[in-house]
Image (tube, rainbow, N blue to C red):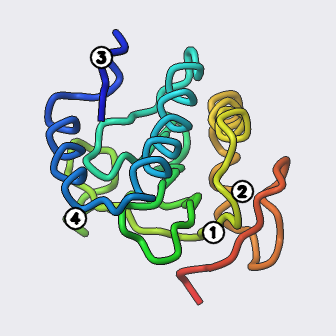
Amino acid sequence: MKYDDGINTLSDETRSQLDLHDEQFTSVDPERAVSNLRVLVTTHSSSGETWASLDDPRCDLLAEPYDSDGFYLAVHAPEPGDVDGLSEIEIGRWEADNPDKEYGKHTSATGSPVVACVLPAAPEADAITHLLKSVDEEPMLIAQWAETPVETALVGTTMVVTKRYDS
């Protein structure tokens, strides 16, 4: 993949991981993978003041607003070679690794998915940017989305919850 675009969105480690993925592509995979990555990079670049991270070998976009009570929003692009090739929006929550310490008190934590929206088609950058800006403006919206039942759209979006991890 060429990345000589002047954008410092991806770290050297992430770029190295992407280079390793290149070796696994079929003839169709590179176009789809580049398209999926372009959506995430475009979203990240246009998210303005919204804090979001795109620095993961899987090329996930992660938003975790400060005042969201430990909830986060993740956008997962399909990995090269995925059979279904579907994107997914995940609402999850950080849980302290040490049960004796409260999350956020300078302790390590592990993210656990709460709900997922498997998308029937690759999302447009504008739709993902809307999600990021919504949670930036109202951080506890993520907690509200985490309560969404299966087959119901996340409030203010057209993205429908397809799976709950607590049921």
Q: Which of the marked residues, 4 or 1, is nearer the chain's N terminus?
A: 4
Relative to 164, say whether 154 is above or below: above
Left or right, 141 with respect to 103, comes to right
Is the residue marked by circle 2 packed among few (<14), some (14-19), or many (20+) residues within 10 Å?
few
Q: Report if the CB atoms under discs 3 and 1 are less than 8 Å apart.
A: no
Q: Which disc, if any, is residue 144?
A: 2
Q: Which of the marked residues, 3 or 1, is nearer the chain's N terminus?
A: 3
Left or right, 25 with respect to 60, comes to left
Q: Amino acid at mark 2?
A: Gln
Relative to 55, say whether 157 is above or below: below
Q: CA distance from mark 1 to mark 2?
A: 18 Å
Instruction: Look at mark 1 in the image and give the residue it sits on.
Output: 118
- Mark 3 vs mark 4: give the one in front: 3
Image quadrant of residue 138? top right
- Please state which of residues 78 and 23 is positioned toward the viewer in this rendering: 23
Instruction: Look at mark 4 in the image and give the residue it sits on.
Output: 97
- Please state which of residues 92 and 48 is positioned toward the viewer in this rendering: 48
Image quadrant of residue 42? top right
Q: CA distance from mark 3 to mark 1?
A: 31 Å
Q: Which disc, if any, is residue 4?
A: 3
- Please state which of residues 53 and 31 is positioned toward the viewer in this rendering: 31
Q: CA distance from mark 4 to mark 1?
A: 28 Å
Q: Report if the CB atoms under discs 3 and 4 are less than 8 Å apart.
A: no
Q: CA distance from mark 2 to mark 4?
A: 24 Å
Q: Which disc, if any, is residue 99?
A: none
Q: Is residue 113 visible?
A: yes
Is the residue marked by circle 4 packed among few (<14), some (14-19), or many (20+) residues within 10 Å?
some
Is the residue marked by circle 1 packed among few (<14), some (14-19), or many (20+) residues within 10 Å?
some
